[in-house]
Amino acid sequence: MTILIVAATIEEITPLLSEFKLQAGTNNCRGNKIGVLITGVGMTATAFALGTEFAGASYDLAINLGIAGSFDQSVELGKVVRVAEDCFAELGAENDATFISIDKLGFGQSVYREKLPANIQDFAPVPVKSITVNKVHGNDQSIEQTLTRLHPQIESMEGAAFFYACDKAGIDCLQVRAISNYVEKRNRDNWKIGLAVKNLNIFATKFLTQILH
Ligand SMILES: O=C(O)c1cccc(C(=O)CC[C@H]2O[C@@H](n3cnc4c(=O)[nH]cnc43)[C@H](O)[C@@H]2O)c1
């Protein structure tokens, strides 16, 4: 099996890389080709890195691992979720108080979905609906407007770009994120990045162990 592991920063997947003795670039692991791609934070960096990668190599499955913010404050920090659907939340035009999506403008598609191979559906975590943003929400009014318009459960800065690139390249894709913070007025003291990274890597290690046999 050929797998590409994609993360914005190396810190988010360091425990996984250590466990499987993987490095950024191409690795041979138990007879499987495993690529590790560190894209940098944000949609532009992700799209460029994946476009470059997919131009030179094909994979059976690409996995995006990262942390994310949860709009729902009843979700425990550290929880691991699977992004079934992601959306370029800001791609479109403002018309005074209303927002016109890229779909409605007729210039493209804002929503992309995971594409799971049949054999991994049984052990994937709970599915959620995510949005991808250039500007992390940190204002009560804009959070309320986004919740009303898109009904997201979580947000990240890369997910939709990951799905977009996989869709264009025709590669199966899975996005798994652990909740590091709530989407609220910015308060870094409340973030639990260490816990989210730990839980994300526990999941990813089990997952990779299962699919590599
Ligand atoms: O210090 C800040 O205000 C700040 C704002 C945005 C992101 C960060 C990070 O350090 C993490 C970047 C990384 O994590 C993902 N992430 C985590 N939480 C969120 C969120 O609430 N909204 C959007 N993205 C989030 C993101 O995908 C980045 O890769 C610090």
Image: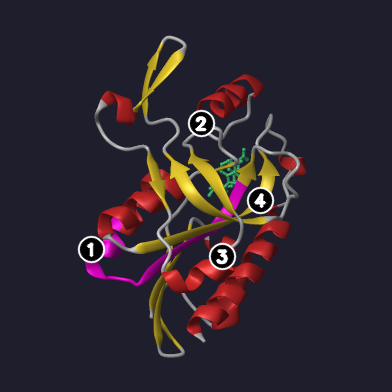
Q: Position of residue 133 (x, y in %)?
A: 48, 37
Mark 1, residues whose alpha carbon is within 10 Å: few (<14), some, or many (≥20)? few
Label placed on residue 150: 2
Q: Position of residue 5 (x, y in %)?
A: 45, 67
Question: Secondary structure beneath disc 4?
Answer: strand
Residue beneath the point at 37% across and 45% down: 44
Question: Secondary structure beneath disc 1?
Answer: helix
Question: Secondary structure beneath disc 2?
Answer: helix
Residue beneath the point at 32% across and 29% down: 102
| Callout 2 amino acid | Leu
Label placed on residue 55: 1
Q: Earlier in the sequence, mark 2 or mark 4?
A: 2
Mark 4, residues whose alpha carbon is within 10 Å: few (<14), some, or many (≥20)? many
Q: Earlier in the sequence, mark 4 or mark 3?
A: 3
| Callout 3 amino acid | Ala
Instruction: Describe residue 210's horizontal placement relative to residue 73 as left or right.
Output: left
- Gap between marks 2 and 4 measured at Cα: 19 Å
Q: Are marks 2 and 4 in contact (CB under 8 Å)?
A: no
Mark 2, residues whose alpha carbon is within 10 Å: few (<14), some, or many (≥20)? few
Q: Toward the viewer: 199 or 149?
A: 149
Q: Which residue is mark 3?
A: 124
- Gap between marks 1 and 2 measured at Cα: 32 Å
Q: Earlier in the sequence, mark 1 or mark 3?
A: 1
Label placed on residue 179: 4
Residue 192 painted magenta: no
| Callout 1 amino acid | Ala
Looking at the picture, does residue 44 appear above or below residue 151? below
Looking at the picture, does residue 116 appear above or below residue 41? below
- Gap between marks 3 and 2 measured at Cα: 24 Å
Magenta segment, which residues? Answer: 51-68
Q: Position of residue 182 (x, y in %)?
A: 69, 40
